[in-house]
Image: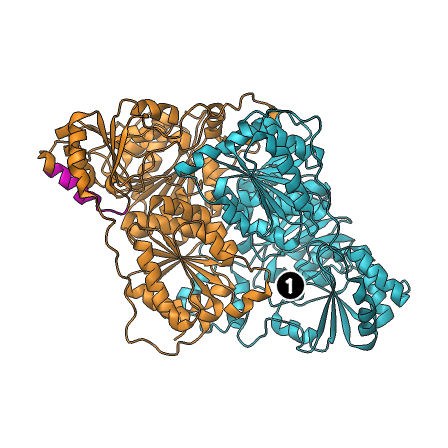
Chain colours: A orange, B cyan
């Protein structure tokens, strides 16, 4: 019984049974210990950003912790961007990082670095057992910290000698991670909120855990009874959508327009969300999006019991049930491929219960509207702005749910973590990747104008264009073991989607677009 | 004249004219300013690890600073692993990271993170101008810090408003980065070193800047005159090699054997290198590799003038010139492909003046020996142990030298930063990628035994194997714009190498191996 065994035993006791791994020498005892833990599913990822994004996706769809397995500082750094997204999604992740043996650190070997400093910037918690006998308790604490609430990325740094060292005493049972209490609601605010909802132009602003169908239904009742608008943050962690599910108004990504959207709001009641701010700063656009005299009330902060908060408001307002307006999914489109017909094709064919991992960026601009009355599904979005999240999150979501996942990518964003395709192939995951190819970082054309960086010269053009050479996206997928098709019309896209949904395992559809929108 | 212009003007004044870029919104003014700086070569990379590895490779072959351009914390994190290698290579890099506008940071927008904490773990220097008028001086300081000596990664964090804000006063000239003095030699050690070289079993241990042909020639004279062995660190930053170049004995990677190699050495004189330590810790293998009673003398620390130190020893020993033994490159191999015939094929065909970026790992085990009498060339190795360095470093080396670069990869390592292939295609770089495919993380088979993680079960086997599905390495290359060939015999490999060396632009050769060695 060594430290690695104790780590795995504690993980299993706490129902952490999925590990997304890219191991190296320091992690070999953990890898060996997996042979004694047949109920743990270890999933090999060819790059650490795939492992961390997969843990994020798994947590988003299950609410449960998955573990990563990364190799020292460089492994953590390679996985950091998707951990940043997980942090912003406020999901629980157990981030396991092998380190040099405790006694080896002071020799400053080539792979030595300050792992805690890099992990610290994730603003979660950091755990580093120093003896094999400490591993179990530290692991349980890390899992508890990961769950929170609020949930976060808990990093467990496991020195090699602590991993391979024998326990002096094998405990009779492995420690259980205590679940923390929810962040308290300030019930004293309730009366005031009710008054403001009734007497001012108010909006309920949903985010975090408040984007389930049940929570949004409560918010809809509150809105209907009080006259308040119900809104949702721009980038929800996991949002229930589709026919029969109440859909709040989504805050517009573009600050210029979001400011207009919120201009008349006198009261913004935050439920599960933080106050909305500009994704970036832009010259002459404010960072805060609400009007200067808007009262922002944090009724249910992240990590609090958002459902109780909403139920209390429903109660106070005596808000009756509300019928969600019926609507129809778009007909399957025909003819030319463009951003509209792409969105319609997804909406028309989406299987019930599917999960969308959306990193389609500019090309996906019509998706949200088009899928409002699609079959009920879940939408996962880019919470932290770290590009390269879509394919890895799809891996984790597919493993977490076992249902069909649709990963919407663009050529630029797909190339950050294409290695995820191989894991989809190896694990036979039911993921349909739809990759839009406009051969540009089109969002930057756009952002460039917004920040006022005018003029288009040759040098800057070459930093925005992806067409020299054009990337053969299908070729990338096929080389990594995922069958790929390129479609040229909307009809072909619809057919390809239907075939993919009917075929177990992953498939890849390349959608060339003539322009960004 | 805005902050971005001031940054670029200061870079140009200081001869920093190459930028490896993966920009986002916060960097758009820098990108726009490139249109006014036609002498700056901006190279688009599809992933940040390519940009940072390229800056490392550029610095290794030119001794000059290249800049990166990265997007906030996630961009830095994605580039961190190859910056770690650059740090361990002790090469100068100007790491430019766009950040949120200064006034936007406090709103904790989705991409907000502690960039300085992540950059701090690179143990270089960090610069963050707060006003456009401060950019030039901070940039000059960063470039000066990058050069050192010792050289390091200097990070310049450029907030968006500092980038887009107008300078109040345009300086009449842009500041010059002062070059620091070399780290002082302790000349008082010289007599003692000479005595120890003459009276004990001694070795001169070369590393860092002391692996040029000229420095190694001096070391050879010292060895010949004193009887000392001349050795070189396991992973040199850039080492001159090939026919006519004196080749020191390379310290073996495996600590178990390195301990034996050093067991009789009573005096180890460090020149440009740190004391050798185990790459990892292994049970029952010491971290320090020298014998307990070995006297380790840091004659010329990293950043000192290693040539002067060696010349002084030559002088004191009155060491005559030494003929480098003649030898012959291997004949072009024929027949089966294996690690031996692969190494022979490289050695037999290598063009004079070529640069090898070596990330072939286990499969490249015979390379160092085979190329001893190849045409004169330079060898760049994995200084920091962060896998994914080979292709990006080849990009930077090709741009820095304009000569043929051979990137030796393995299937496992290539998949960390395959995006570099696209930049090779776009820039038409003369890079020949030779990718060995054994469909395993073979080094881990090996490391696993060494750390004593015994037993091979199904779960662990799946974390070491890459054959389900096998990756079509050529397919990856072709999809990213690099023409690829798979060879099946040593003869075909020789032909493919010769064709590639005779053809401008990149090419890719896949070499399937039946087993690791």
The answer, for residue B325, to whether it is visible in the render is: no
Looking at the image, residue B413 sits to the left or right of residue A231; the answer is right
Mark 1 element type? loop
Q: Is residue A44 magenta?
A: no
- Residue A428 position within the rendered picture, expressed as x and y whole percent measured from the top left: 36, 52
Q: Is residue B53 left or right of residue A431?
A: right
Q: Position of residue B502 (x, y in %)?
A: 73, 43
Q: Mark 1 highlights which residue? A: B365
| Location of residue B296 by image quarter | bottom right
Mark 1 belongs to chain: B
| Among the 4 quarters of the image, the one containing residue A64 | bottom left
Residue B23 is situated, as x and y percent measured from the top left of the image, at 53, 35
Task: Give above or below for B372 relative to A434.
Answer: below
Left or right side of A471 for A403: left
Q: Quadrant of the C terminus of chain B?
A: bottom right
Residue shown at the point (53%, 42%) measured from the top left? B47
Magenta segment's dominant SS is helix
Chain part drawn in magenta? A303-315
Residue sitting nearer the eye, B54 or A234: A234
- Residue A432: % across, % down: 36, 42
Q: Is residue A279 above or below residue A417?
A: above
Residue at the far top in the pictured view: A455
Question: Would you say residue B177 is visible in this rendering?
Answer: yes
Q: Residues within 10 Å of mark 1 (few under 14, many from 20)?
A: some
């Amino acid at each position: 019984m060594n430290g690695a065994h104790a780590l795995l035993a504690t993980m299993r006791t706490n129902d952490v049974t999925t590990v997304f791994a890219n191991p190296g020498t320091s992690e070999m005892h953990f890898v060996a210990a997996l042979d004694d833990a047949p109920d743990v599913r270890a999933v090999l990822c060819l790059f650490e950003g795939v492992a961390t994004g997969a843990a994020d996706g798994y947590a988003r769809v299950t609410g449960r912790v998955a573990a990563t397995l990364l190799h020292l500082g460089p492994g953590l750094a390679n996985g950091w961007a998707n951990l940043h997204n997980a942090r912003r999604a406020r999901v629980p992740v157990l981030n396991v990082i092998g380190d040099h043996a405790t006694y080896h650190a002071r020799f400053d070997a080539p792979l030595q670095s300050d792992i805690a400093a890099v992990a610290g910037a994730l603003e979660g918690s950091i755990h580093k057992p120093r003896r094999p006998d400490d591993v179990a308790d530290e692991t349980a604490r890390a899992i508890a910290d990961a769950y929170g609430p609020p949930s976060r990325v808990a990093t467990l740094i496991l020195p090699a000698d602590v991993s391979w060292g024998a326990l002096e005493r094998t405990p009779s049972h492995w420690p259980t991670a205590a679940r923390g209490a929810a962040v308290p609601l300030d019930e004293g605010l309730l009366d005031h909120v009710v008054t403001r909802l009734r007497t001012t132009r108010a909006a309920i602003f949903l985010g975090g855990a408040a984007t389930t169908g049940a929570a949004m239904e409560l918010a809809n009742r509150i809105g209907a009874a009080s006259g308040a608008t119900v809104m949702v943050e721009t980038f929800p962690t996991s949002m229930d959508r589709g026919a029969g599910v109440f859909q709040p108004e989504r805050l517009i990504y573009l600050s210029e327009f979001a400011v207009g959207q919120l201009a008349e709001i006198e009261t913004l009641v935050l439920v599960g969300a933080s106050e909305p701010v500009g994704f970036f700063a832009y010259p002459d656009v404010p960072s805060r999006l609400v009007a200067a005299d808007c009262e922002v009330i944090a009724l249910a902060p992240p990590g609090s019991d958002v459902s109780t908060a909403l139920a209390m408001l429903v109660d106070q307002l005596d808000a009756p049930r509300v019928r969600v307006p019926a609507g129809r999914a778009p007909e399957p489109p025909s003819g030319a491929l463009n951003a509209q017909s792409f969105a319609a094709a997804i909406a028309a064919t989406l299987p019930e219960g599917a999960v969308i991992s959306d990193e389609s960026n500019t090309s996906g601009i019509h998706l949200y509207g088009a899928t409002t009355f699609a079959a009920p599904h879940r939408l996962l979005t880019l919470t932290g702005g770290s590009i390269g999240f879509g394919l890895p999150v799809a891996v984790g979501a597919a493993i977490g749910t076992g249902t069909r996942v649709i990963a919407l990518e663009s050529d630029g964003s797909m190339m950050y973590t294409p290695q995820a395709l191989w894991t989809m192939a190896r694990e036979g995951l039911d993921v349909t990747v739809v990759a839009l190819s406009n051969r540009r970082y089109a969002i930057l054309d756009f952002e460039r104008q917004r920040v006022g960086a005018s003029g288009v010269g040759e040098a800057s053009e070459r930093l925005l264009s992806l067409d020299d050479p054009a990337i053969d996206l299908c070729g990338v997928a096929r080389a990594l073991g995922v069958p790929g098709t390129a479609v040229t019309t909307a009809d072909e896209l619809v057919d390809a989607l239907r075939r993919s949904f009917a075929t177990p395992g992953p498939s890849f559809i390349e959608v060339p677009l003539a322009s960004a929108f």
